[in-house]
Image (cartoon, rainbow, N blue to C red):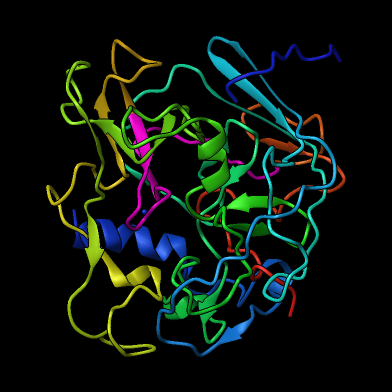
Amino acid sequence: MPKPKYCFGIIAGIAGLIFSTLLPAQGPGRPGGPPGGPGGRPLRQHTATEAKPLDLVPATEKASGENQVAIHQEDPSRSISSNAIPDHLVGPFPNRGNPHEIAPQALTFEVTATPEIAAEITPLRLSPFGFAVNGVFFDPGAAEFWQGDRDLGWQYEALGGAVPLGLDENHAHVQPTGTYHYHGLPTLLLKRLGASDSRHSPQIGWAADGFPIYARVGLSDPKNPASPVKVLKSSWRLKAGDRPDGPGGKHDGAFVQDYEYVAGSGDLDECNGRFGVTPEFPKGTYAYFLTDQWPVIPRAYRGTPVSLRAEGPPGGPPGGGRQGPRGDRPTNPPGGPAPRGEFPR
């Protein structure tokens, strides 16, 4: 098998319609499916119903090992290889909310280098949305459900604070396999890339459908490169009133299902993206933006994503993920069963 060539470098109807499609995919799974993850193992059981402020762990530690990430673009594909070790300081792991230690991974994926808009939006399942330029996953969903039952339809929001997950100041933590991953804004990565409210965001990663990812700041007029920049606003908001069933209580952000999309209320579409010019794409592209407001990391795709979960043993067909001895969570392609909770019981 020839050695791959790499070069080091760039590495959630409208409202009701979107949620009727998006939320079952994010949480409950298919009726009649296994009660938890692979093999029917149970999910952790939670009864919390209220959002709480995040208690982020200060990033004061250097991860063990050196960051290794590479990409190679050869149309129509972009190959990405990473050990998922971050290139910035992290919180101490294990910590009180997260019992796992960061460990190197062996991840290799291919995404299209010529992405196109699909006929339909694809909701994000419990799978990474994409990769940061440092090779770390953007993986917003948490496999944590009210009463440990995904069929009840209430998935905890990782940034909602109802279930403490030991997130560090990069809004990241570690899976049981040792995979460090971002649930929200990668604070110190943005700082390292020189992100600023006074200029357009640098590209911070690639989505699984091949479109670029930016963070927070874009042009006020997406078609005019000379227009001033602004902090872009999501078009999602908390629903009014109380939850109609399940955990009850006010829609306060403890659960993914507490949010609704309101077209035109912000700068971005239901996928937290838009068409426009960017520094890296002066002729224009569709691009995703991480935002300060929910969903922060997008929860749906405009293009056609590949699965960023393993598609079989190393050497399997291209287009999916190939993972080494310490790969990420179990295979979870779109439509597949949700894995176990973030942590062992």
Would you place residue 189 above or below residue 141 in this image?
A: above
User: Toward the viewer: 59 or 29?
Assistant: 59
Query: x%, y% of residue 107?
Result: 74, 36
Rendered image quadrant of residue 84: top right
Residue 306 as seen in the image, left or right of residue 237: right
Asked if the magenta segment contains residue 309, the reply would be: yes
Would you place residue 173 above or below residue 267 in this image?
A: below
Query: x%, y% of residue 297?
Result: 43, 49
Q: Main secondary structure of the magenta part?
A: loop
Q: At 57% across and 34% down in the image, what residue appears?
A: 192
Count of labels shown? Answer: 0
Rendered image quadrant of residue 277: top left
Report the quarter where the N terminus lies.
top right
Would you place residue 321 above or below residue 178 in this image?
A: above
Q: At 75% across and 11% down in the image, what residue appears?
A: 5
Report the quarter where the C terminus lies.
bottom right
Query: x%, y% of residue 311?
Result: 69, 41
Q: At 50% across and 66% down in the image, what residue appears?
A: 158
Query: x%, y% of residue 340?
Result: 66, 69
Pick out the residue farthest to the left: 264
Would you place residue 224 above or below residue 99 in this image?
A: above
Asked if the magenta segment contains residue 15, the reply would be: no
User: Toward the viewer: 137 or 232?
Assistant: 232
Residue 79 as seen in the image, left or right of residue 18: right
Residue range in magenta is 287-310
Q: At 87% across and 45% down in the image, what residue appears?
A: 325
